[in-house]
Amino acid sequence: MNYIIEGAQELPVVGEYDVAVFGGGPAGIAAATAAAKTGAKTTIIERYGYLGGLATGGLVILLVGLTDGKEQIIKGICKDTIKKLKQVSRIEKIGPSILFDPEALKLVFDDFIMENDIKPYYHTFLSNAIIYENMVSAAVIDGKSGRSVIKAKIYVDATGDGDFSKFCGIPFLQEKKEKLLPVTLGIRVGGLDTEKVKAYINENHENYRNILKSLSLSVRMGGWITTLHKGEAWFNVAHAENTDCTDTQDLTHAEIQTRKTVHKLIDIFQNEIPGFENGYLIDTSAQIGVRDSRRIKGMHLFTREDTDKIFDDAIARAPNYISGGQGSVQVPYGCLTTRKMNNLIFAGRCISVEHELFDMFREIPCCMATGHAAGVAAALACKSDNEINVKKIDISQLQGILLEQGAVIWV
Ligand SMILES: Cc1cc2nc3c(=O)[nH]c(=O)nc-3n(C[C@H](O)[C@H](O)[C@H](O)COP(=O)(O)OP(=O)(O)OC[C@H]3O[C@@H](n4cnc5c(N)ncnc54)[C@H](O)[C@@H]3O)c2cc1C
């Protein structure tokens, strides 16, 4: 590869905050809201023009993993979100899960920002971290206004892919391409006779699967559900395997491949599935759905042995999928912090967990729960009278505030 040297530049410092949250997905919005509620001057930086991450732009419109099979184990800011969603739009319970409208969620998250006096930077890409010894001293951001810098006492990496931590040189885990879960282009389809489509797919499930297989689509994950709107459904089946979403060329290829798949799929469905004759594509997700990328190596790496442990530094609960969805596990704070940096916390799907257990922690509610904890921890760390160090905060104080803010920690 050829290289060129980009000249050194003076970058304007566009803002100084107590807490800067990078990534406005479920984890990031929960972190920013919690940090602000705990008294920190907070900002949120998001590469797209809306908040919600995969829950909005990825058309992932179902909150899964809210319960341990019996009771709700994720509350706090996630519960506040559901309450707000109900005020602006209809939601629907599907068993223990909650179906919502992604446009309504964008509105709710904008409200969280305004109500909590959080400074938003949309259309802003985090492109580097400037570090000095064990501290991040600034984050480099890019946007239409050019390149600039944000400074904060504490930085929260909620980019899903652990971009911030990568820029800090923190070790991470990532499966080989062939083992990564597929990426998926979500779609919404209108003009359906949904009852007929449902009946056909239920009664002829093998035919439906064969259609997917005829386009080389894996049937190991994904599915479809009707949305809140009449005649409309969400299909989560246009997968691309072997995609490393931290590689720009892989992402590009996956977008092109899955888009082509979607159009072929709709043509076939129109011909093969009764009730789909007048079906049309409403939209494809603005951002391709990434399940699996970097998981940052934290102070604690959550492994199978941890699933029945009680942690002194527990900050949240997650559904226990290795016990068949019954019961829950505790998420320790050590999965959100790193040995290397003292003013960085991570949250969401990039936390420190083994790949085989990853599904328990990557659903939207759990990402909101780890985001909630990261936000409170960040606010506490920057209030410290001594040195700033997210690993030296008072854990019982963190747990106390989380409980006051409605989070669930103990079984
Ligand atoms: C196809 C699919 C189906 C799924 N189905 C379900 C389901 O039914 N129910 C469920 O609960 N979960 C589901 N999930 C999982 C869930 O959607 C995600 O794991 C969850 O949204 C992760 O939240 P997050 O905040 O960690 O990351 P993300 O939602 O990925 O958000 C990260 C945010 O950071 C921003 N960002 C990233 N890099 C940068 C950067 N460098 N600079 C600035 N901003 C940046 C992104 O734009 C994004 O807004 C599904 C996932 C996929 C892909």
Image (tube, grey):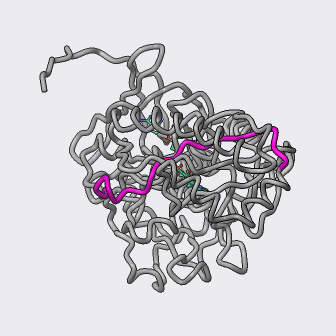
Task: Identify the image quadrant of residue 373.
Answer: bottom right
Question: Does the image show residue 136?
Answer: yes
Depth check, front residue: 24 or 211:
211
Q: Residue at x 40, y 71 (%)?
A: 356
Question: Does the image show residue 20?
Answer: no
The quarter of the rendered structure image containing the C terminus is bottom right
Task: Identify the image quadrant of residue 96.
Answer: bottom right
Depth check, front residue: 362 or 243:
243
Position of residue 122 measured from the top left corner of the image (x, y, whole percent)? 56, 27
Q: Residue at x 42, y 42 (%)?
A: 153
Image: 293 above or below 366: above
Position of residue 390 measured from the top left corner of the image (x, y, whole percent)? 40, 56
Q: Residue at x 40, y 32 (%)?
A: 252
**Which residue is the extreme one toward the left?**
2
Position of residue 90 measured from the top left corner of the image (x, y, whole percent)? 86, 49
196 displayed left or right of 237:
right
The quarter of the rendered structure image containing the N terminus is top left
- The region drawn magenta spans 174-193
87 displayed left or right of 121:
right
Residue 294 counted in the magenta span: no
Image: 185 above or below 38: above
